[in-house]
Amino acid sequence: MEITKKTEVAISEINKKLEEKCPNLSVELQKIGVAFKLCLNIGGICVSYLVIHDDNETYNILSTTENGYEGQGYNKFLTAVSIYLADTLTSIKILFSNTVVPARIHILSQYKHSKVEDQKSDEDQKSDEEIEKRGKVYNFFVKLNEENKKIAEEIINAWIKNKCVKPSASARVGGKTLKKKRTKYSKKYSKKYSKKYSKKYSKKYSKKYSKKF
């Protein structure tokens, strides 16, 4: 995967839309080793991000949001941005993401799926509390096609139009404090989840579905 001119143009277009509605917000994509970090910045500080990497020919995304900034739709917005940018970064056609978090399940459920593992047909009838209590891992395989790119673009535009929300009081900390928090949670997240779930599930399923689609 590589950041291309098309990637830079697409990010610039998104940031122009953000500047009109939410001038303190911006999207930034950084390459870190073989992975990419897609940030939503508030005043230049990354408060929510996705780590994107090529894992066995799947477009693998891992997400986190800093304490005090949860519940404001940042993860939903960044997921849409990552899908919208996908065809400018890679030729991979399948996005893979696994989660036990009900909010994350609902975010990914807005896209047309290649496959959803461990999800029963009556899952939509269950409450968030029931899903969370069960603690089951859901493996989403989402096609990176024009249909899902269009869905992502609609989500981006709707979010920018309707969701320019100030952070909670507990989140209004100085840049130095937030950077310390970001380092703490970044390490905690990547070590706890990426190794545990990404290796376990992506190797098992990605080759099967990348060949199929």
Image: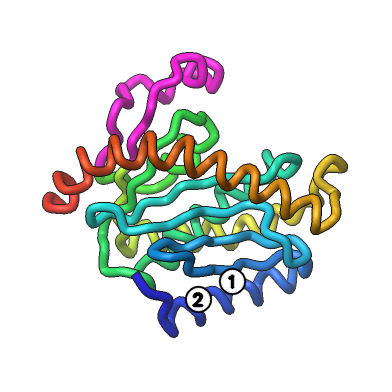
Q: Nearer the viewer, residue 177 or 15?
A: 177
Disc 1 marks which residue? Answer: 14
Q: Is residue 57 left or right of residue 45?
A: left
Residue 181 in view of the camera: yes
Q: Is residue 164 left or right of residue 78?
A: right
Q: How is the image coloured?
A: rainbow
Q: Nearer the viewer, residue 38 or 153?
A: 38
Position of residue 187 measured from the top left corner of the image (x, y, whole percent): 56, 45
> From the viewer's perspective, is residue 190 above or below residue 162?
above
Instruction: Specify the label residue 10 is tagged with.
Output: 2
> From the viewer's perspective, is residue 125 above or below residue 48?
above
Q: Please count the marks in the image.
A: 2
Amino acid beneath label 1: Ile
Instruction: Specify the label residue 42 is tagged with.
Output: none
Residue 22 in view of the camera: no
Position of residue 102 measured from the top left corner of the image (x, y, whole percent): 51, 29
Q: Residue 27: which quarter of the image?
A: bottom right
Amino acid beneath label 2: Ala
> From the viewer's perspective, is residue 122 above or below residue 115?
above
Residues at discs 1 and 2 in contact (Cβ within 8 Å): yes
Q: Is residue 171 left or right of residue 90?
A: right
Q: Residue 174: which quarter of the image?
A: bottom right
- Taking the spot 84% from the left edge, 40% from the top edge, the residue there is 170
Position of residue 50 measured from the top left corner of the image (x, y, whole percent): 51, 53
Tell me, yes or no, whether the highlighted magenta stretch contains residue 80. no
Q: Which residues are magenta?
A: 115-140
Which residue is situated farthest in the bottom direction here? 5
- Taking the spot 33% from the left edge, 47% from the top edge, the residue there is 96
- Taking the spot 38% from the left edge, 27% from the top edge, the residue there is 137
- Taking the spot 30% from the left edge, 26% from the top edge, the residue there is 118
Tell me, yes or no, whether the highlighted magenta stretch contains residue 134. yes
